[in-house]
Amino acid sequence: MTFNNPEYLWLLLLLVPLIVWYIWKQYKSHASLQVSSVTFLKAMANSPKRYLFHLPFVLRCSAVALLVIVIARPQRVNRVHDEQTEGIDIVLALDVSGTMLAEDLRPNRLEAAKNVAIEFISDRPNDNIGLVIFAGESFTQCPLTTDHTVLINLLKSVKFGMIDDGTAIGLGLANAVSRIKSSEAKSKIIILLTDGSNNVGDIAPLTAAEIAQTFGIRVYTIGVGTHGLARYPIQTPMGIRYQDIPVEIDENVLTKIADMTGGSYFRATDNSKLQAIYNEIDQMEKTKLQVKEYTKKSEEFLPFLLAALLCLLVEILLNNTVLRRLP
């Protein structure tokens, strides 16, 4: 509900002096009368008319307020959005190898990557997004879907040990390409996140990049890990012990993959940089949205007008019947 002439609502302030005048008038209208007995006056005090005495004035104020609302022209506004979207299909290729448990990111690389990816997915409700995981081999955790609740639940369930250990970057990328190559979306991208270099698998990373290039798929690569050494947990009979392991990210290959496919390479050395990388990708790959808005207005003054007329009619009836005053 809105008003076409809201400035007229200021007229409601006229009710304030009207109420003040009525109260002042009632105060000044008290008179004294000498009578021999007040018995009959006590009976009058309990009359129903006593409770209706101020009702005409209340009805008059209500009528004035309703007429002001009528003058302001209340309207009901219905807006219809006609949305046209240019979809973007995205596959997240996530490394789940043992080195992703290193704790140079908090609580570790794998959990940090999952948390940031979940935020990224939540901010893109219009896109088809899928999930591929890889270590020594690769499989599809979730195909392309707009049901992001299911996707996020599947992403949360990802953990180390689901597949054989190792780092098959080429195999993971090839699997992601196979999931998105047949998409009819105008924009197809893969976000590949890893913390190592390709050491297993039958497909070389650059070969997989050539396949992605053939299908017009952009690949954004992210190398996760600090520079130098990273704190890594090792399970022993005496419990978990920590050891510093070297960070070995094949940045040369990851950069070539990104350059070949028209994407970009990023290095995430801590949680904040990883978050910033996903934010940058999110800005570069925004879904195009065209919105046409249609507005339909309907006048809603009639109920207020009828209510005002009803108040005036009831006031007139009361003043000429049960509350009639004799001169």
Image (spheres, rainbow, N blue to C red):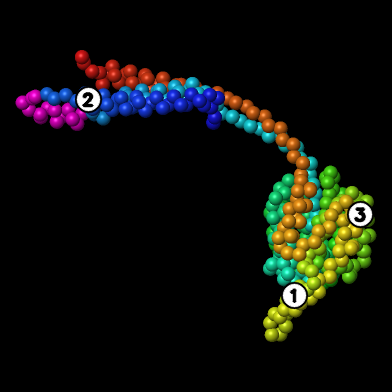
- Dot 2: element: helix
Q: Is residue 122 above or below residue 106?
A: above
Q: Are marks 1 and 3 in contact (CB under 8 Å)?
A: no
Residue matched to label 1: 232
Tell me the CA gap for discs 1 and 3: 33 Å
Q: Please provide percent x and percent y for residue 209.
A: 91, 57
Residue at image x 29%, y 19%?
Answer: 319
Q: Is residue 158 visible?
A: no
Q: Secondary structure at mark 3?
A: helix
Q: Which of the pair 163/77 is nearer the observer? A: 77
Q: Which residues, given as a range, are shown in magenta?
A: 34-47
Instruction: Say which quadrant the N terminus sits in.
Output: top right
Outermost residue toward the bottom in this view: 238
Quick check: 43 left or right of 199? left
Residue receiving disc 3: 260
Q: Disc 3 or 2, which lies upstream in sequence?
A: 2
Q: Amino acid at mark 2?
A: Lys
Q: Residues within 10 Å of mark 2 (few under 14, many from 20)?
A: few
* Quarter-of-image position of residue 253: bottom right
